[in-house]
Every structure is written in structure tokens, then in C-alpha cells.
Amino acid sequence: RIITWNNTLLRNADNAITGSMSIGEDITERFAIDRMKSEFIDIVAHELRTPLTSIHGGLTLITKGRVHSDSEQGQQLLQVAAKSSQQLVELVNNILDLECLESGKSPPQKQSLNTRDLTSQATHSVQLIADQASVTLEVSDPGFEIIADAHHLKQVLTHLLDNAIKFSPTDSTIWLTVDQTLPTELGKPVILFKVCDQGPGIPPKQCTTIFDRFMQVDSSDTRQKGGTGLGLAICRKLIEQHGGKIWVESTLGVGSCFYFTLPVS
Ligand code: ADP
């Protein structure tokens, strides 16, 4: 806990010191609220202002009649405003998801399931964007029985596949594999999920930090590829809640492999 101390000397009528009084105040909650406030201001400053400015600027030009909405420029401004508002919705949803997970308001609803159902649902939901990007998805999953939250795990797999597609060059392949590791002297067996791509790779220094909030390898990623920089922070939280681990191994210019483990039930 965080305590502030206030020490005061006590004096008698002749101004001689007779003692001291110390008052401690527990400011743990206030400190946490202050930290949340300053984090929120950082988010507003960096992440919300940019899309809001382009929505406001574009719509003002149109509503004041300076640009006609039917003109080519008007249409471009409207498209930018629509894309920016979609980005804001995604950002606010991600912030709320993460907050919900961190405060323990969204514990996993575990049930018995087969990994093959998860991998086929996740690949099915990204198949269209993979086709649009001319990227092939290859899945190898013998089908393991696990006890986990199907919705949370599908969210993690879909996000890793989404990222892999986003960063893959055209005509490349993404491999999604599921395996069970053998028990070793050091550890119990785990179910290991792996998503590998042939994208640009991630510099070694950033392989850990990209799992932190708002961390992107290149600050222009949001503009060029979309995304909020919160996806991997959410994935890490979801996997940790299942007692698993998530990490990336990557070689620049060759590709990246994202791994996560789940305990064998
Ligand atoms: P976003 O929601 O912006 O995609 P993430 O938290 O999912 O945010 O990812 C953070 C950053 O990690 C991305 O902006 C990108 O720089 C890097 N990254 C994630 N996946 C890959 C990948 N498969 N290949 C290369 N870089 C990646």
C-alpha cells in the first residue's frame, strides 16, 4: 500500500518541544485513480485525437458548404471520416475489453472443447480477407480435447491470424499448427498453438514490447494497416487467464511465429 506521512512537532506554551505527531494516510486508491487518469489522458492525446481531428475537419468542410459532398474531394473526405470513426469504435471497444479483463470482470467461461473446432472457426472467419490479400492459410490440427473459454480462444486465434494476414506479402502462406508437447523434467505437457507467417518480421528488441498496450513496431502501422496496438495486450491477458503463455519468435525479412500454450486438462 502507499502511505503519505505528515510529521508535526508538538510544543507547549513556552514553545518547548514536548513530542511529535505523525499522521499516515493510505493513498493507494487515490494513487491508482491518478495513474488511470493520466493513462487516459495519454490515450486521448495520442490515440483519439488523430481520428477525431480528421472526422471533425472533413465534416466541417462539407457542412459549411466549402466542399460539396458529391464532389470527388467531398467523397474522399467522407471516406476518411468513415474510416476514422470505425477506428475510434475499434479503439474504444479494445480499451473497454482490456479494462474488463484487467479488473477481473470477464473471467473465462471454461467448457470442454476440441481444438479443431476452434481452428476451423477462426480460419473460417478470416478466410475472406486472406483471399483478398492472396494469402494461403494452411492448418494442421489433429484435434485435442481441452477445457477453455471458446470465445476467448477464438478471439486470440483470429487476432493472430488477422495480424499475420495484414503483414504477409501477396502469394505467401500462413501456417496454423496445434501440437501437444511431451512432458519434460522441467515442465508438464502443454497444448501449443503456432501461427507462422512470411511477413517482414519483428526486430528482436520489440519481440517482448509489442505485447504491451499501444506498442507497434512502426508508429505508422495504425495509419497503413489499421489496428489499435491493443490486440496483442488483450491476447496476452486472455491466455494468461487460462494459465498459458504467449510469445513471438521472429527473423527480420523471413517471418514471424506467434506461439501460445494452454495447460493440458
Ligand atoms: P494492432 O491491433 O495494431 O494490430 P497488436 O497489438 O495486434 O496491434 O500488434 C502490435 C504490433 O505488433 C503491430 O502494430 C505490428 O507492429 C506488430 N505485429 C503484430 N503481428 C505481426 C506480424 N505477424 N508480423 C509483423 N509485425 C507484427
Image (tube, rainbow, N blue to C red):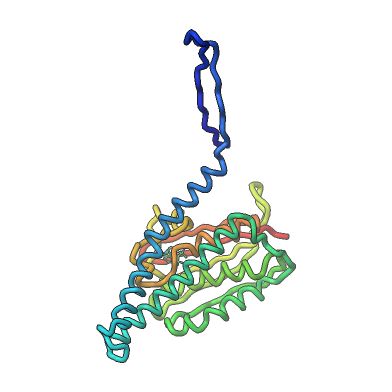
Residue 193: quadrant of the picture: bottom right
Side of 28 relative to 112 (left or right): left
Q: Nearer the viewer, residue 99 or 221?
A: 99
Please give the name of the residue rendered at 68% of the width and 72% of the height, measured from the top-left corner.
143
Q: Nearer the viewer, residue 258 or 102?
A: 102
Counting from the top left corner in percent of width and height, residue 264 is at: 70, 59
Q: Looking at the picture, does residue 129 appear above or below residue 94?
A: below
Residue found at the far bottom of this picture = 70
Q: Looking at the picture, does residue 95 appear above or below residue 26?
A: below
Q: Looking at the picture, does residue 180 appear above or below residue 6?
A: below
Ligand 1 image position (quadrant):
bottom left
Residue 171: quadrant of the picture: bottom left
Question: How many marks do you count on the picture?
Answer: 0
Counting from the top left corner in percent of width and height, residue 137 is at: 51, 78
Please give the name of the residue rendered at 40% of the width and 77% of the height, measured from the top-left corner.
83
Please give the name of the residue rendered at 28% of the width and 90% of the height, measured from the top-left corner.
71
Quarter that holds the C terminus: bottom right
Counting from the top left corner in percent of width and height, residue 117 is at: 66, 76
Please give the name of the residue rendered at 41% of the width and 55% of the height, measured from the top-left corner.
42
Counting from the top left corner in percent of width and height, residue 11 is at: 51, 13
Residue found at the far front of this picture = 13
Side of 60 relative to 47 (left or right): left
